[in-house]
């Protein structure tokens, strides 16, 4: 049935034109699955290690593939344990988290193929598929995703009142288009950043005005509530030597950063703020969560890196109230699921996420439905983003 008979790996392109790893898994009854690894730019210090694609492929062919033959793809933990055993380190620095996550996802798809179930049902079980995540749609970007643009990495449309995932997805696309209109009316030219968001050469303050205006216009059109949120990726802004957050010529201490973010939450009724503080500052995260956690999601991305140990520390400290889930940050689907379960047991919302470097792989759309995640962050437009968004629409339409 789902016993693995073959694993093949190849180097393919990601959305930045870089090399990444794609894995095919075959099973004895002819099951087939394919997975491709994403890649981050604003990576967390504690993420699993991504090796150069060719090196990761060579190492995985040598150490992982022989161990996987004979393993049942339907037993995801056995697949992922074999990957961990083949690597032998705690951060996949031997075979690369890129080959590991590609194989982990491909095996899950091969098993679903054999079992004749959609991936979300294979991963989540027979009672999943009724709840859909709110898509957080990147509409203005800067930080590590675009040069000469905003310091804040992402401004994210959040169609929290959308009656369906399809209407939510289209609302985000409409906000993305409305941002272009508002920029045009202001005479601001804009290219797009790594994730397809507009990357205008404007200040953060002006970006808030533009996004607020665009969201208001679309909300009036669609007739349901649309808010917006941020990924501040503040670890990229934090200067260890100066012990301050650097915004061009200005700096903010941790206390000033907390005040700044708390003010933004109230001024713009932000639905979501990801990584508002440095990845090592659990205490400041806890203070901000205390201040605004009753009316917005404070999400740990670089803080937690989909890692249960770091999430346990965060729960202990009262840091954040949601976690970003990225399988390639930790290396396998089993590890990502463990983080989701720990979060759910402790009342933390989960946000399944893409990376800035992506492919047409749609696994995270299924992962979001399989885990009843409240949110998914996977862009707004662009082929590697619409691949996932359209897969969510297909899942809702029972067409997968
Ligand atoms: O910071 C993030 O949340 C991700 C996705 O937006 O970006 P990157 O993949 O560059 O880490
Ligand atoms: Mg982030």
Image (tube, grey):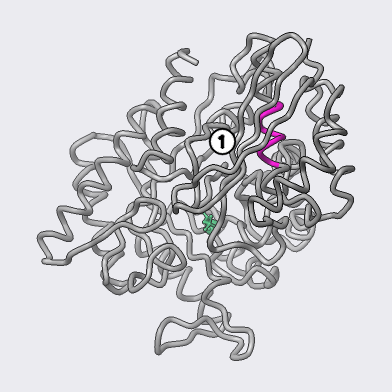
Q: Nearer the viewer, residue 11 or 263?
A: 11
Identify the residue shown where x is 12% and y is 59%: 184
87 lies above or below 393: below
Secondary structure character of the magenta stretch overall:
helix
The residue that disc 1 covers is 364
Up/down of 392 relative to 284, above or below: above
Residue pictured at 29% horizontal, 37% vertical:
171
* Residue 248 relative to residue 292: left or right: left
- Residue 126 lies in the magenta stretch: no
Question: Which residue corresponds to the image point at 45% horizontal and 75% vertical from the top-left?
Answer: 260
Q: Nearer the viewer, residue 316 or 125?
A: 125
Residue 345 lies, in percent from the top left, at: 75, 40
- Quadrant into which the N terminus falls: top right
Q: Inspect the magenta stretch and tell me whether residue 102 lies in it.
A: yes
Magenta range: 101-107
- Residue 355, how many percent across, how many down? 53, 50
Say few, some or many: other residues with alpha carbon within 10 Å of mark 1 (under 14 / 14 to 19 / 20 or more). many
Residue 28 at x, y = what percent?
77, 12
The reply to whether residue 350 is visible in this rendering is: no
């Amino acid at each position: 049935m789902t016993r693995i008979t073959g694993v093949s790996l190849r180097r393919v392109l990601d959305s930045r034109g870089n090399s990444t790893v794609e894995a095919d898994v075959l099973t004895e009854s002819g099951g087939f699955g394919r997975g491709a690894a994403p890649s981050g730019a604003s990576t967390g210090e504690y993420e699993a290690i991504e090796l150069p694609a060719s090196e990761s492929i060579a190492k995985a062919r040598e150490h992982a593939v022989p161990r996987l033959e004979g393993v049942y793809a339907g037993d995801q933990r056995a697949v992922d344990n074999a990957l961990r055993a083949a690597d032998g380190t705690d951060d996949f620095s031997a075979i690369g988290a890129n080959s590991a996550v590609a194989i982990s996802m491909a095996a899950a798809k091969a098993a679903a193929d054999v079992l004749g179930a959609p991936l979300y049902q294979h991963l989540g079980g027979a009672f999943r598929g009724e709840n859909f995540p709110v898509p957080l749609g990147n509409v203005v970007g800067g930080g590590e995703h675009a040069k000469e643009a905003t310091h804040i990495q992402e401004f994210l449309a959040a169609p929290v009142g959308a009656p369906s995932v399809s209407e939510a997805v289209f609302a985000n696309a409409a906000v993305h288009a409305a941002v272009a209109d508002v920029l045009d009316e202001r005479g601001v030219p804009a290219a797009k950043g790594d994730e397809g968001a507009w990357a205008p050469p404007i200040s953060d303050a002006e970006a808030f005005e533009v996004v607020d205006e665009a969201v208001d216009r679309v909300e009036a059109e669609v007739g349901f509530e649309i808010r917006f949120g941020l990924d501040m990726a503040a670890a990229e802004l934090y200067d260890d030597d100066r012990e301050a957050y650097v915004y061009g010529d200005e700096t903010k201490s941790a206390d000033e950063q907390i005040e700044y973010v708390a003010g933004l939450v109230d001024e713009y009724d932000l639905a979501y703020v990801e990584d508002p503080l440095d990845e090592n500052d659990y205490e400041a995260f806890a203070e901000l969560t205390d201040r605004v956690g009753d009316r917005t999601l404070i999400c740990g991305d670089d803080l937690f890196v989909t890692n249960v140990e770091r999430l346990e520390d965060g729960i202990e400290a009262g840091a954040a109230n949601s976690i970003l889930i990225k399988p390639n940050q930790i290396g396998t689907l089993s590890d990502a699921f463990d983080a989701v379960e720990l979060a759910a047991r402790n009342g933390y919302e989960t946000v399944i996420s893409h990376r800035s470097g992506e492919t047409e792989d749609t696994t995270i759309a299924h992962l979001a439905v399989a885990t009843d995640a409240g949110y998914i962050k996977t862009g707004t437009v662009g082929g590697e983003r619409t691949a996932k968004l359209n897969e969510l629409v297909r899942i809702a339409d029972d067409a997968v």
